[in-house]
Each structure stands twice: as structure tokens, then as C-alpha cells.
Amino acid sequence: MRNVVLILWIGIFVGPAMAEQKPPQNAADIYRKAFELYQTEGQKWTQEVLDELEAKKQSRTSESEPNLQDFRMHVAELRERAAWQMEEKISDFADGYGQLDKEIEEYVSSHRDVINLVWQAAAIPGCSWDLNPSDHYDLVYVTELSRKNTSLRDLHNLVMADIRIEEEKGNCIRAIHQTVELLQITSHVGNQEVMDFLTAMGFVSKNVSYLQRQIGRIPPDVKLLDWLNERLDQENKRIPSLADCLQNENISFNKEAFENLFKLYDPNSTFTVSDEYLNWSRLYHDAFRKKLIHAVSLPYPQAIVQLEKLYAALQWDTNNIWENPNQKILDRDKAYRCDALLTMTIEDNRTQVFEISVRTQNHFNALCTAVKVYQAYARAGLLPDQLPAGCPMDLFAMKPFAYETTSDGFMLRSAGKSSAPDDDFKYEYKLTK
């Protein structure tokens, strides 16, 4: 139910505030739109995109820009092959499952110009990866990471699959360089709304998992590790912030949106929103959002305490608006007088989002810590007895990660979480002699 309400809220409250779609600003934007149209099941190749490609070709000023006519013909050909049927296989391969085969290799190779375009777009400062901002979100795309839409996911999976092919062929150093470069894509995605933020967290998580595996498959190389340490420090500063996202998110307060909200719970609702009710709701939400931003800006141990208090208060303020709480059936009279209803609908899952953001950032911190351990190993030929100085903190405990050597490498563990063997807060790293 939470996911259903979240998705419907996004369509109602965020959608109207973002309905005006800006035209493509550069070749990368046009390519992304083209990719979306031929790569996603149910989309059609439209004359509008062809015209945009042709116009861009006529007005291009840089000879280094790809040949748009060739690209147009290529994507049209790929669409005819119904390439979307390979998406699931490519997704699994990008996630580290399955083995490289001829079908995967040929599919990725046939998308070489699209992959090259992703590299171009990732390098453009401020390149917008926002696809179909005026569309409502579809339930089928709500996952643990709440990826915003299938096209952006497919772009990332396609490039990650290409990187894994390099890795499987033994080109691990090249794969490491590419994985780090692809981290740039996250800085373009995630500080405007929570769904985008979660998309970015998904990309960071996958890239960090790749690096965790890749770095253990190469011999110790001081120069490479020094470069990796520096680049990870740079990319860490670009990872989207949940506090910034909540600050930037544009929530639409208008009567039509409210009336549609009531219809989510009561399809027969004929409630007319008054200016007074609208103002009460806005003031309540502004106060709640201010406290929420403050809470998620705190260190994890303090943040969780504040979030529990904040949501307990919200629960209290909305506790009596249900005729049937289990089925989320509103008591109309009470709901129409409740200034917390909108806030309850919008902000219901922010603690979960915060947990995802901390878990992802903690995984990144563990990787940065591991690189420093590898650096010490590369210089001394032995693993250090304790973590080197200057390692980032375990965000769950706000102290260094627990560190131990293993038979084939070392392990970092979050000191602020369970140490059970099957938990999600241990990070294993291998060594290649």
C-alpha cells in the first residue's frame, strides 16, 4: 500500500510542478530520447525525434560530435530487431549474474554508439538525465531502489554490461577506470526529487560493488591505487545528498491535486478544497519537511532517534482519520479537517529512503577504506595490522570500520550493525598476489 500511495502521490503532486518539459539542450539529450524510444517496450519511433536529430545535424558546430544521420539509421534498425527482449538478460549480467556468451557480447557490441554517447553525456557538466518528467510513474518500476524509469536503468545496465565484458576478458584495469568514470552519471541524476535520488543510489551501489570485485582481481599497483584513491575522493563529493534532495523537491500545492488525493482513498469523493484547508496543509508540511531535513542531516545514530520521534508525531496527528485503518478507508469528515493528511501521504517512507542512502554511502566509505588498505599492502607487501590513518568512518557507528584479515584478503564490517554472518554490512576484499 505504501508503494501504491507513493507512486500516486508523485504523479499528483510532483508531476504538475514539472510538467513543462524543456527541449533537448545538446546532442546527449537527443540521443537519450532516441534511446528511450527504441529501447523501451511500448514506445514508438516518432517523427519528432527524427526531426530533432536532423536539425541538430544541420546546426552542429563541432566535428567531434557523432554523425547524427548514421545514428538515426542505426537506432531505427535496432528498434526493428525488438532489442528490448534482451533487457532482462543484460540486466542480470550487469548485476553480476550469469556468464558471458555470444548473444550478450553481440548485443552490447551492436549498441556501441549508444554506449559511447553515455560516456559523452556523463562528462557533460549538468547534463540532465531526467526522462519523461511529465509522465506519472508506473507501479512496475517501483523496486527497492525505486528506479525512476526503465530507460535510464537500461542505459546504465548497458554500460555496466560492457564494463563487465572487459573484466571477464581480463582487462580489469580498463574496467576499473570505466567504472569510476561512470560514477559521474550519478551527479546528474539525484538532487531534485526522491525518486531520482534513489535511482542515483542504485547506480552508486552497483558501481561500488563492481569496484569491490575488480580491485581484488589485479596485482597490487601503487600508481593505480593512488589514482583510484584520488578519484574516489572526488566522486564522493558528487554523490547526491538526501538533505539537498528534500530541500530541492518541488511539491505542488493546488486544489486539484488535493481533490485527486482524496479520490485515491475515496473514488466517490466530491470534496472541494478550500483556501483555508490548503493553507493549513502547506504550513503543516513546511514545518514537517524542515524537521525532516534537519534529521537526515544528523549522524546516523542521532538521525534515527529524531526520525522515530518525527514520524510518531505524524502518526498521532493522522491516527483518527481512518474509518478502516487496515484498508486505508478514510473517515471523510475527520480527513477533511486533518492538516497532516498530505504530509502523511508524501513523507510516509522517508526513514526507509534515509536507510538506503546511509547504507549506500557506507558501502562507498568501505570501498575508500579498502583502497587505503590495498595501498598499504602494495607498498609494504603485507596487509597492515590495523586500518591506515585517514580512513572514512562507518556511518552507522561513527567510528572506524572493524577490520580483520582473512585467508585470501581482508574484511571490513560495520561496527554499528549486526555481525551475523549473513548480514548486509560486511565487505569482503580479495588479494591477488
Image: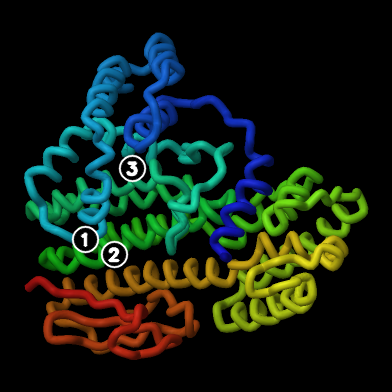
Side (left or right) of 198 relative to 18: left
Q: Residues within 10 Å of mark 3 (few under 14, many from 20)?
A: some
Q: How far, Cα to Cα, is label 2 from label 1? A: 9 Å
In the rendered structure, which amino acid carries the disc numbered 1? Gly
Q: Nearer the viewer, residue 324 or 427?
A: 324
Side (left or right) of 162 relative to 268: left
> Residue shown at 40%/58% (left/top)?
202
Q: Residues within 10 Å of mark 1 (few under 14, many from 20)?
A: some
Residue labelled with disc 2: 209
Q: Earlier in the sequence, mark 3 or mark 2?
A: 3
Q: Earlier in the sequence, mark 2 or mark 1?
A: 1
Q: Residues within 10 Å of mark 2 (few under 14, many from 20)?
A: some
Q: Is residue 257 above or below residue 426?
A: above
Question: Is mark 2 in CB contact (under 8 Å) with mark 1?
Answer: yes
Q: Nearer the viewer, mark 3 or mark 2?
A: 3
The quadrant of the image that shows the N terminus is bottom right
Q: Nearer the viewer, mark 2 or mark 1?
A: 1
Residue labelled with disc 1: 96
Q: How far, Cα to Cα, is label 1 from label 3? A: 16 Å
> Residue shown at 27%/57% (left/top)?
227
> Residue shown at 76%/76% (left/top)?
319
Q: Residue furthest top?
A: 58
The quadrant of the image that shows the C terminus is bottom left
Residue labelled with disc 3: 155
Secondary structure under the numbered disc 1 in the rendered image: loop
